[in-house]
Image (spheres, rainbow, N blue to C red):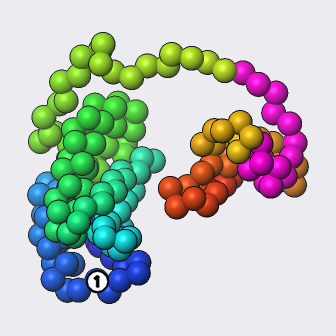
Amino acid sequence: MKFTIYGKNMHVSEGLKEALKKKFEKFDRYFGQETEVYATFSKEKNYQMLEITIPMGRTILRAEEKTEDMLGSIEAVVDKLEGQLRKHKTKLQKRYAEDALKYNLDELDSAEEDEADAPKVVRTKKFAVKPMSVDEATMQMELLGHDFFVFLNAETEDVNVVYMRRDGNYGLIEPIF
């Protein structure tokens, strides 16, 4: 695996880099040498955060953990990624058969999920999409008290999504066709 390691509001020591790579050795049997792993270490108040992103063909595995020490964050992220791989093994193999061949997921145990516990769509909502600016969409989102808002961007004439980020700022999702 190829690692790209960033530090946000901190310097990433060689020891942390080596600890991350050592923990990710268990994933060598699932991923090839060309697989990219993007890691972002950051400090936020008294917490140490780690975000991992692994592009897998058309799917992206992502895990983020925040603990009081960075080694704990590394452990938690590795556990979370392993759970994601186990859960999505069958989905990945069926949906992206040609991409799944690049990754050796056969060694993972299949997740035993009860159909009753599986999430399902419980409500469908339809609404008219009106052209508006990004500022109007954020204001509408706040007025409704939602975490996100779907709208037709008046400038680009594309459907966009504006959302509230964890840091209190806004994010905008623009599709690329």
Residue 39 in the image: x percent, y percent?
33, 69
Q: Secondary structure at mark 1?
A: loop
Q: Residue at x 37, y 71 (%)?
A: 45
Q: Residue at x 16, y 68 (%)?
A: 71
- Quadrant in the rendering for residue 108: top left
| Tag 1: amino acid | Val
Q: Is residue 168 left or right of residue 159?
A: left
Residue 144 in the image: x percent, y percent?
71, 36
Q: What stretch of residues is rendered in magenta?
A: 126-140
On the question of residue 37 being in view, the answer is: no
Q: Which residue is mark 1?
A: 12
Residue neighbourhood size for the residue with mark 1, other residues' Cα within 10 Å, grouped as few (<14), some (14–19), many (≥20): some
In this rendering, the answer to whether 129 lies above or below 147 is: above
Q: Quadrant of the N terminus?
A: bottom left
- Quadrant in the rendering for residue 53: bottom left
On the question of residue 164 being in view, the answer is: yes
In this rendering, the answer to whether 77 lies above or below 145 is: below
In this rendering, the answer to whether 63 lies above or below 89 is: below
Residue 67 in the image: x percent, y percent?
25, 61
Q: Residue at x 30, y 60 (%)?
A: 66
- Quadrant in the rendering for residue 134: bottom right
Residue 101 in the image: x percent, y percent?
29, 45
Q: Residue at x 39, y 38 (%)?
A: 96
Q: Is residue 105 left or right of residue 59?
A: left
In the image, 45 versus 12, the foreground residue is 45
The residue sitting at the top extreme is 116
Does the magenta-highlighted stretch encompass residue 102?
A: no
